[in-house]
Image: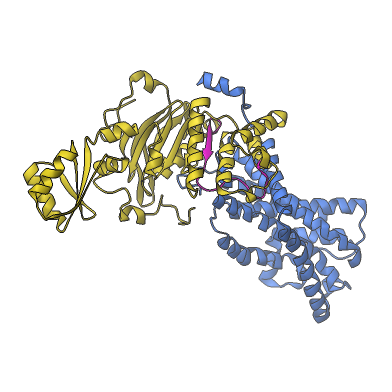
Amino acid sequence: MATQSATFAATAPASAGVLLPAFTLWWREVVRFYRQRARVVGVIASPLLFWIVIGSGFGTSFRSGQAAGQQHYLNYFYPGTLVMIVLFTAIFTMMSVIEDRNEGFLLSVLVAPVPRAAIVLGKVLGGTTLAAAQGLIFLVFAPLVGVHMTAASFGLIVLTVFLVSFALTALGFAIAWPMDSTQAFHAIINLFLIPLWLLSGALFPLSGASGWIRGVMYANPLTYGVEALRTLMYPEAPSAFSLTASILTLVLFALFMFGLAFVLANRRTTKPAA
Amino acid sequence: MTSNPSAIDFPAPAQSVEKAAQSIIAVRDLVHRYQDRTALNGVSFDVRAAELFGLLGPNGSGKTTLFRILSTLMVPTSGGATIAGFDAVRQPGALRRHIGVVFQAQSVDPKLTAYENLWHQGHLYGLRGPELKTRIHEILTRVGLLDRSADRVETFSGGMQRRIELAKGLLHHPEVLLLDEPTTGLDPGARRDVWQYLQILRDQEHVSVIVTTHLMEEAERCDRLAILNEGNLVALGTPEALTREIGGDVILLEARNPQTLAERIRNKFQIDASVMDNQVRLEIENGHRFVPDVVEAFPGEIQSLKVSKPTLEDVFIHRTGHRFWSEDAEMRPETGKKKSKKN
């Protein structure tokens, strides 16, 4: 055994570590995304359309409630749209976990001497990069909705977008890992993730909600992402939580989701891996 | 080679003790159960260094299950396997360094170029920088795809994609290469290329190659074979030794009433005649001498007659009492996996 290891050391280092495999998985995720033009267009265009159509429609029908102040609904809806972009990109990117598994790509990663932590980290950071990038691209419309950012608030917006992206990508990873069909994944998105977004304060403010809906909104980690962004974009608008509380909640959410993804990926089973 | 209590008596194994000492893969009493089905039922064998070793079996025989356990993708219910001295269950991390794996499904990323796929693969094995670059050029030259290195894999033909798969599995100089039905979906030319390359690997780089197949003509190219049926090892040895063990020739007779004919042949000639697919089948030495006797003995009853040298399929029939591609075996899902699509 010793001699075999020795002869091997000449061609490959003892361990690939965590960072190099994580980097290469991250790199693949990003390259793959930008080589599929339709995905890029879809991810930017559809929320934009959503924002303008729903925002304009709701804006004229409802004339948003007192909590949103004198804001036009398009302005109120802006941070929520950004979170939606992040949500969709993050979640759909992690659908690649299922595709990778079905195609065999994931198998070749699983049989490589790579710690599972590196696989989770690489995939999740790849999705995070894409989701955060899409979210930040949407910021070019910020001046149109009366958002004036300072360097500090811009930095905090980037941080918030990163945290939300990371948490949601890790959530997507955890959902996708045990699955073997993308149809089931779509079902989960419709059943669970869309309501998660609807009840995040993206569409209507916390103060306007009543009873149990309000309870759900308080328990929903996405609410803190939307609130943090709204506070940063419209400092004068009233907000339910302090910025620090929101960001800390997001950090915990992100850590919890990453932990969950790691635990799921780290199981070795007697069931087929694919 | 340790003796295995649950094993079937193997055809007089030709290997000596010294040779067994060089074994690079040792499989011991491997048992694997899916919820309702036993996929492996106490399988033991050894693979020697620089050997081209085949796992032959019909669908549902357990060969893919065995492949998954050896490649550390799955933990067996009981028993164990070691590769290059590392335990597949307890030391998966160390073991993975020593094996290259080529899956039946495509594992290359079609959106990446050939070079990028290998670059990515190298990183997973801790290779990097100029060393990795040199190695990628070397392996691409080896599989004859250096000129396509900057092209996306999605533009490649099936045979070329297989070669990239092989390059991926070999990039980190593994001592053992595991392949799961590597020629699935390839035309005969590309099939032959893959096998020639496996032989070159064995001869020039002394890589031990273990390959699953359900094709007899592929199995015949292996140095040694393990034949699996319904989770049991039914035969182990060189293709020559296995076919030689049948002794003589195989004769197939077609008759209007095969059951009666078999019965009468058994009584008259005291040889074992069985009925399979409405044909009477018997194994006999010097078949050509038996032919006139049997035709003479039952005039008008035999519609056609075929004498042939035993093949691996005959070995399978001899050992299991049924055909390799029985309908029963074909109906069974390959390894109890949920999704049935499999390319």
Instruction: Locate the N terminus of chain B and report the quarter of the image it occupies.
Output: top left
Residue B6 location, quadrant: top left
Tint of chain B: yellow
Residue in view at x 43 percent, y 44 percent = B64
Q: Give the range drawn in magenta.
A: B96-114
On screen, residue B117 versus residue A148, left or right, reads left
Residue in view at x 88 percent, y 71 percent = A71
Towards the viewer: A42 or A226 = A42
Q: Can residue A25 be seen in this view?
A: yes
Q: Is the magenta stretch mostly helix, strand or loop?
A: loop
On screen, residue B51 versus residue B240, left or right, reads right
Q: Position of residue A230 (x, y in %)?
A: 83, 62
Q: Position of residue A76 (x, y in %)?
A: 83, 69
Tint of chain A: blue
Q: Position of residue A174 (x, y in %)?
A: 60, 52
B104 versus B202 height, above or below:
below
Residue in view at x 82 percent, y 60 percent = A138
